[in-house]
Amino acid sequence: MQTQLDVHKLSVCADNKQILSELSFTTHGQGITAIVGPNGAGKTSLLRAIYGAMPVQSGQILLSGEPLTALTPRQKAKKLAVVTQNNVYDAHLTVEAMLKLGRVPHLSLLSRIGKKELALIESTMALLQITALRSRDFAGLSGGEQQRVLIARALIQEPELLILDEPCNHLDIHYQHQILALLKQLDVAVLMTIHDLNLAAQYAHQVILLNNGCIEAAGTAENVLNKHTIEGVFKLAVHVDRHPLTGAPYVFYKNQCEGN
Amino acid sequence: MAKLFISTLLLLLSITSAVFIGPAEISFDSPLWQTLIIDIRLPRVLLALFCGAGLAVCGAVLQNVTGNSLAEPYLFGVVAGAGLGATIVSILLQDQAAFLLPIAAFIGALLAVSLVAIMAVSSRQGGIATLILSGVAVSFMLSSISQFLLFSADPFASVQVMFWLMGSLARAELWQLAWIAPVVLIGTILVLLVHRQLDALVLGDEQAAALGVPVIKLRLLMLTICAAITATLVAYCGGIAFVGLMIPHIVRRLIAASTAYLIIGSAVFGAIFMVWVDVLARSLFGGQEIPVGVITSVIGSLFFLGLMYKK
């Protein structure tokens, strides 16, 4: 079944400030949809409104035709998994215990984790190359390892849609590319925020550029990431060319002190 | 799993040996055997067991739901509240107070918890910081009222309240266990039922909520269970410090940090610890009893100083 996320005229308001105004977009099928934009554009708020951590003022969010706001938190957790910005460095759980948390929305109070679930955990650990970490303390892992464990935890939730807030923050370039390449190959639809325009261009099949709570441009990286749009939104002189190896658009930033 | 099994064996061993240790030596064929072992020592050992288990489980749960490793069962002013109840009864009824003391202490403890809960719910930010701060404030407020009352009352009441606050299992009787055991057991089972949801809290509130965990309701339920267990224990046994704080720390190191193991481990270790503390309390100075709270405080403070020194 094709996962489809429909966001229709979504408005979000917090502390009497309009954060998102009448935002509409649709994502189709698997692959990465990247939300880019300057600080304070409303990227994280958009994600939080979709997964229900922020009240929706008006508008609709439909996942495969079903309005998300009508679901209970547990029903919602069976359909979409969330990896918030990494802030659990000191969680003292073994990696395996952390991964089992992915089954929380699926299990009733008295049921136990069964063979099928353990097999799912095994295969997901293999997929993310974290099998060797299984009995390590989560708090003792490196940033890249923690991020892979958190993504595995989200996948074990078996969601239709995977939401990630800045999955590449604090990661070195090796892990940035490893994690994005992995997300791209996954069998789920991915919606994520990301700061780096070039990473978005290289891995996302759809890019949404947010500015002041509105969509400035949306579509393929070729359509969205052009000189005119980027300079208008980020107030920075740029040159847009092509990545010599992948052919994706590549943004070069001019040094502001040197002028034009 | 194996470690938990061994600890449980250790607990059973502790119970059987603890009933035979005490100031009075006794042989099996003595006519007093039944009276001393079954009627006097066994209730005490069992009271120590449930007291230690209950306090350690509450400490573990509160440390998890508040995300603060210094959280402990007396965080919400339970002891200060119970102390106020005990003080009022001691002053009003003088030497007839003994029977009513646990009831008054229980009411006082509930008063303290309700005050803290009202503060935390009505405060605009809500959250854990408010809860902890109101706990401290309520504690000091109720203690100062107790101290003022004792200051203006006669010395007998002061002595009675002071000894009660230091904690004792000497008043143990089987009928008390009929109250305490169910409260501790049911509370622990309820906590174990939501062990996965409690584990999810380590991810942070927002991430836990995204896993479908009703974070606020869960936290409120856990606080209520802990308040019920602690108020019951304090009412019968007085203030026994450091058990709820120290035992979960030991269990996290020796057994595991995930909630299911932590809770069961804390119950078993807390029970073993209190059973032996009580043995010390009644046998260290011959016929003279030391309040158990004094012993737990000495061991607890040395434990934490040692922990810090090693770090």
Image (tube, helix red, strand yellow):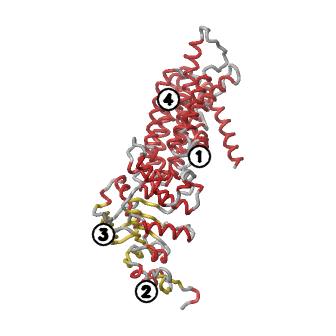
**Residue B155: quadrant of the picture:** top right
Name the residue carrying label 2: A228
Q: Residue farthest to the bottom?
A: A260
Is A32 situated above or below B56? below
Residue under disc 4 on the same chain as residue under disc 1 = yes
| Mark 3 crowd level (few <14, some 14–19, many ≥20, 10 Å Cα) | some
Chain letter behind tag 1:
B
Q: Which residue is mark 4?
A: B104
Of badges 3 and 4, the one in the foreground is: 3
Q: Secondary structure at mark 4?
A: helix
Q: Quadrant of residue B28?
A: top right
Q: Which amino acid type is shown beneath numbered disc 1?
A: Leu
Q: Quadrant of the N terminus of chain A?
A: bottom left
Quadrant including the C terminus of chain A: bottom right
Q: Are marks 3 and 2 in contact (CB under 8 Å)?
A: no
Q: Are marks 3 and 4 on the same chain?
A: no
Q: Chain of mark 3?
A: A
Three-letter residue code for mark 3: His
Q: Which mark is residue B70?
A: 1
